[in-house]
Image: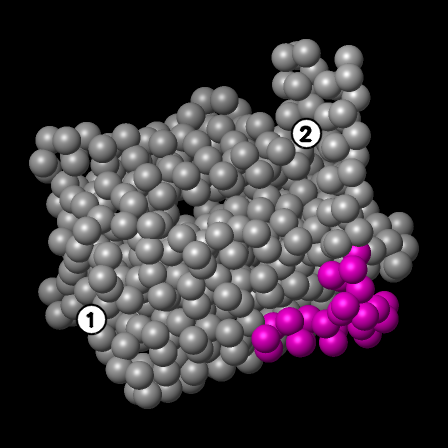
């Protein structure tokens, strides 16, 4: 029985979900420790530093991740080696450019007055260099649908970091500078592991070709714009709050939206497993199957998230107390969390509409859509702070770009194959009922035996 259960759990959906779940749980644990170890302003500086770091890294991940999976999945052995080598070349060039920018910027870091900006300038180049091998390895194992290996990579990258932070918390040595050392150390150790295991496939660097490099580049130039612009939503809010309200307000806002991981875990997981299915249907020329697959994933995830969102709204105060501690109990964090969870059920529509547009070779629509969403987000957030004088304005403004994303994505997909947006929810409801009935039947049979 135990062996059968283990075999059932070793499917791509569970492993992808587990990988994202482990990352989120470890990230949540890390935040619990950091929010108690650092002052409110220090947390705000760390959030700003990490947001800018992840934003700039989008030039690499946005260029390569989707393009790599698209050209690697289903290819023959020679083509796979060519794609890996070409990805190493592009990733290396992007990383080299960032390091080259970092060197002169480091010597002029004293010109900047904001301490968060100074920290970023001092450290971003070496962190990107240290993380390159495990980033390439993540692309490879995801394209091969080896979500067990992807789980391992994610666990190590977050696990090393949180281990170092825990040691600093217990030894009372947790400072912002030491936390950056811990982040760098976690990235470097994970990269060494992937190189030793052979998952990074650095030996395939010699198999690169200019033709393949150009293919990845021309596809990636649109996907990087989409990914970069998407990440700019959170980063633009971070910048706006940091410079208009200060790092303490940023710490409170970040805490309030922290439990959005409840939404992001299944979205990231099923996006990773759904993309190969969508691509296979599109490559087979079956337009209706592309839309049906998209509706099945989107609708089912929306139904699954409904009770989670309701629970998060009711228990927001408890969650904030657990994560942030006493000093955040009477802050705006709990209400910010409630606001985000109220319209979070729109996120599956936005995410899978965008993913499907990429699959059907319409990344340009995604790119233009995200630019419009970004402009709307910045205008709405600045206006919200101006009208409310608090982080509530930013939280309320968040619904505007989401609605724009859903609307444009729906328009783009309807040009490809017409469907009703309400059919997404009816499909999800039907899938959920079928799943529950099947599970209940198995459970009844098992008890009868």
Magenta highlight: main SS: helix
Residue 181, position as x, y percentages in the image: 22, 40
**Which quadrant of the figure contains the N terminus?**
top right
Does residue 384 lie above or below 286 as drawn?
Answer: below
Check disc 1: other Cα within 10 Å, few if <14, some if 14-19, many if 20+: some
Q: Nearer the viewer, residue 314 or 278?
A: 314
Residue 113, position as x, y percentages in the image: 13, 70
Q: Residue at x 82, y 74 (%)?
A: 415
Tell me the quarter of the picture where residue 218 sits: bottom right
The segment highlighted magenta reads 403-427
Check disc 2: other Cα within 10 Å, few if <14, some if 14-19, many if 20+: some
Q: Is residue 208 visible?
A: no
Tell me the quarter of the picture where residue 209 sits: top right
The answer to the question of whether label 1 and label 2 lie on touching residues, with beta carbons closer than 8 A, is no
Q: Earlier in the sequence, mark 1 or mark 2?
A: 2
Q: Can you identify the residue that label 2 sits on?
A: 11
Q: Is residue 238 visible?
A: yes
Q: Secondary structure at mark 1?
A: loop
Q: Position of 144 compared to 101: left or right?
A: right
Q: Position of 32 compared to 365: left or right?
A: left
Q: Residue at x 61, y 72 (%)?
A: 405
Q: Position of 361 compared to 103: left or right?
A: right
Q: Is residue 270 magenta?
A: no
Q: Can you identify the residue that label 1 sits on?
A: 246
């Amino acid at each position: 029985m135990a062996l059968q259960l283990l075999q059932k759990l070793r499917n791509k959906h569970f492993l992808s979900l587990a990988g994202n779940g482990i990352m989120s749980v470890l990230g949540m644990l890390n935040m619990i420790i950091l929010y108690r170890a650092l002052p409110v302003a220090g947390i705000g500086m760390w959030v700003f530093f990490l947001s800018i770091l992840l934003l700039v890294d989008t030039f690499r991940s946005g260029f390569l991740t989707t393009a790599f999976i698209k050209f690697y999945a289903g290819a023959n052995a020679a083509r796979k080696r060519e794609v890996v080598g070409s990805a190493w070349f592009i990733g290396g060039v992007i990383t080299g450019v960032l390091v080259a920018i970092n060197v002169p910027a480091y010597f002029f870091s004293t010109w900047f007055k904001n301490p968060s900006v100074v920290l970023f300038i001092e450290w971003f180049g070496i962190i990107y260099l240290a993380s390159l091998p495990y980033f390439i390895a993540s692309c490879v194992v995801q394209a091969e649908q080896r979500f067990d290996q992807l789980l391992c990579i994610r666990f190590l990258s977050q696990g090393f970091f949180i281990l170092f932070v825990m040691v600093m918390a217990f030894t009372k040595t947790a400072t912002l500078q030491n936390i950056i050392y811990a982040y760098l150390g976690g990235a470097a150790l994970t990269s060494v592991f992937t190189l030793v295991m052979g998952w990074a496939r650095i030996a395939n660097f010699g198999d690169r070709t200019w033709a393949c490099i150009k293919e990845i580049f021309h596809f990636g130039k649109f996907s990087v714009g989409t990914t970069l612009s998407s990440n700019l939503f959170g980063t633009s809010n971070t910048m706006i709050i940091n410079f208009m309200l200060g790092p303490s307000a940023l710490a409170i806002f970040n805490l309030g939206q922290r439990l959005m991981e409840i939404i992001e875990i299944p979205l990231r997981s099923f996006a990773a497993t759904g993309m190969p299915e969508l691509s296979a249907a599109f490559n087979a020329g079956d337009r209706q199957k592309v839309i049906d697959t998209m509706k099945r994933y989107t609708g089912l995830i929306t139904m699954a998230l409904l009770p989670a969102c309701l629970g998060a709204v009711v228990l927001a105060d408890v969650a904030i107390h657990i994560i942030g501690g006493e000093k955040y109990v009477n802050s705006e964090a709990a209400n910010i969390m409630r606001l985000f969870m109220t319209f979070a059920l729109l996120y599956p529509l936005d995410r899978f509409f965008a993913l499907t547009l990429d699959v059907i070779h319409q990344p340009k629509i995604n790119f233009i859509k995200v630019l419009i969403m970004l402009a709307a987000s910045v205008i709405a957030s600045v206006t919200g702070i101006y009208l409310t004088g608090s982080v509530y304005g930013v939280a309320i403004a968040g619904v505007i770009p989401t609605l724009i994303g859903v609307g444009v994505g729906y328009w783009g997909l309807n040009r490809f194959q017409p469907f009703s947006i309400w059919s997404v929810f009816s499909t999800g409801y039907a899938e959920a009922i079928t799943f529950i009935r099947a599970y209940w039947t198995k459970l009844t049979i098992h008890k009868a035996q």
